[in-house]
Image (tube, rainbow, N blue to C red):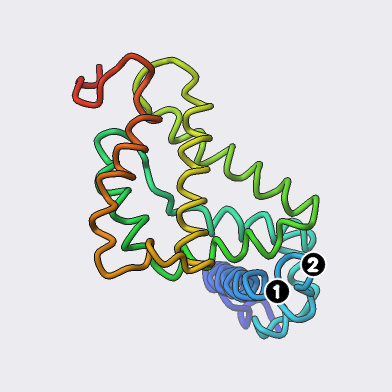
Amino acid sequence: MTLDDQPPAAARRRDAAATRAAILSAAREVFTERGYDGAGVREIARAADVDTRLISRYFGSKEGLFAEVVDLAYEKSLMMTPEHNAEAARALLSGMDKAASDGLLLTLRSASNTRASAIMRESIERNYQRRLAAALPGDDDATGRAAVLIAICSGVLLSRLVLGHTALNSPDVERLVPYLHAALDAVANAPGRSAEEPRE
């Protein structure tokens, strides 16, 4: 094969990007179904229709691949700030797509592994929690309030989507939105600041 016969660099980069995306997609499905401990690199490679060595090339290890999958799974997260909390409460009680459900299952099925648990915690704190804390009004322990809001969000989704809590899946669940809205606002607002008070 001569230099003239080789595909252009742009085509090779596109192939590499497509291969990487296929591995991430397959890994997300396998990790969600089996959790960190139950997922094997060979199984992920088969699902992505790639050589196992490509996982090492693009992600370094199973742990590196899991870390990227986690960042993707947690990417679309609710902003639970006073101006968005009515919408957030409604989404938590009556919305959320398959990606949110899968992200929760990925978390639950991987949490028993100490390293996987640390990876998930670090991802949340580095990305979602930091963004949420920066958007909250007031300077009083925004990081702590963001952590509590994320815990409320996780708890509602766990009860509703995984445990199938009856009240949270009832046809008239809309009646519960004001309660959750108030709870989110109570945490999102700095102490001593009313929900109606405009943000500076």
Q: To which quarter of the image does residue 198 belong? A: top left
Q: Residue at x 34, y 22 (%)?
A: 137
Determine whether 159 is above or below 128 in the image. below
Asked where in the image residue 191 lies, by quadrant, the reply is top left
Q: Which mark is residue 37?
A: 2
- In which quarter of the view is residue 5 placed? bottom right
Q: Which residue is mark 1?
A: 34
- Specify few, some or many for label 1: CA neighbours under 10 Å numbering under 14, 14-19, or 20 or more: some
In the image, what residue type sits under mark 2? Asp
Tell me the quadrant of the picture where the N terminus can be found.
bottom right
Residue 24 in picture, x, y percent from top left: 61, 68
How many residues crowd around disc 2 within 10 Å: few (fewer than 14), some, or many (20 or more)? Answer: few
Q: Which residue is found at the position 31% from the left and 62% from the top?
A: 94
Taking 92 as reference, is 39 above or below it?
below
Q: Is residue 193 left or right of residue 197?
A: right
- Residue sitting at x 42%, y 15%: 139
- Residue placed farthest to the front in the image? 167
Q: Secondary structure at mark 2?
A: helix
Numbered label attached to residue 82: none
Asked which secondary structure carries label 1, the reply is helix
- Which x, y percent locates residue 152? 47, 44
Could you tell me residue 138's position as x and y percent?
37, 17
- Closer to us: 166 or 41: 166
Q: Position of residue 159 (x, y in %)?
A: 49, 59
Q: Write the residue at 67% across / 85% down.
A: 49
**Which one is in front, 157 or 101?**
157
Q: Are marks 2 and 1 in contact (CB under 8 Å)?
A: yes
Quadrant where the C terminus lies? top left
